[in-house]
Image: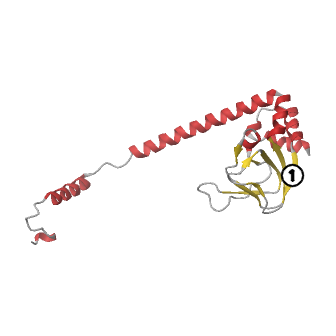
Amino acid sequence: MLDSNVELLRALPIFKGLGEKQLTAILEAGKKVYFEPGQLLTRKDGAGDCAYLVLSGSVRCAGFPGMGIQSEPIGPGALVGEMAMLVETVYPLTVEASERVRALALRRNRLTRVMQRDPGIARQLADNLLLRLRSFAKDLRDFELLLEKKDSAAPLPGPATVEAETQTDAFNKSDPRQPTRRFGGEK
């Protein structure tokens, strides 16, 4: 069982590059917890001091911008509230058990003790977060360039548009004392 949980941790980007002993130390610092359907793992804007590694069952997220009422089910291997195990933060989403969930609670104070005993864990987590932030910054720059291209690709006024604008300008500048011309040349 410990081996399969080590593999769940190893698959997560934040734990990439950690050795077997380091991952085992993190698992041993965690505490198994259970959630029944409908119970909340995290509440949006609630203070967080713990991340949950879903070992079995599934959860759903609510409150993510642009998302419907709830996300699709998220199952084993998902890490919920990742930043809370490292720094003082609030949870950005509400996460609810959609069925019975067995999870590993990774509390910040316990993970901090593990990192104090093995500073290599802290360095690797910091490196992994830095890589993710760089990737995120690149994605933002790419998105900004895409928006700039879209804005610069806006159609330029064609002859029909210029003609219509000229007629509108002439109408707006016409002498109000002159009778208004109607369609078809009528007065």
- Residue 145 drawn above or below residue 126: below
Q: Residue at x 81, y 35 (%)?
A: 112
Query: For mark 1, does the 10 Å Cα neighbourhood hold few (<14), some (14 to 19), or many (20 or more) residues?
Result: some
Q: Position of residue 77 (x, y in %)?
A: 79, 48
- The residue furthest bottom is 186
Foreground residue among 41 and 161: 41
Q: Position of residue 94 (x, y in %)?
A: 70, 55
Disc 1 element: strand
Side (left or right) of 168 relative to 106: left
Q: Residue at x 77, y 32 (%)?
A: 17
Q: Residue at x 77, y 61 (%)?
A: 98
Q: Position of residue 21 (x, y in %)?
A: 88, 32
Foreground residue among 67 and 148: 67
Q: Quadrant of the C terminus?
A: bottom left
Which quadrant of the structure image shows residue 50? top right
Residue tagged 1:
33
Q: How many marks?
A: 1
Name the amino acid, label 1: Val
- The residue furthest right is 1
Q: Position of residue 169 (x, y in %)?
A: 19, 56
Which quadrant of the structure image shows residue 153? top left
Side (left or right) of 11 relative to 154: right
- Residue 93 drawn above or below residue 141: below
Foreground residue among 100 and 63: 63
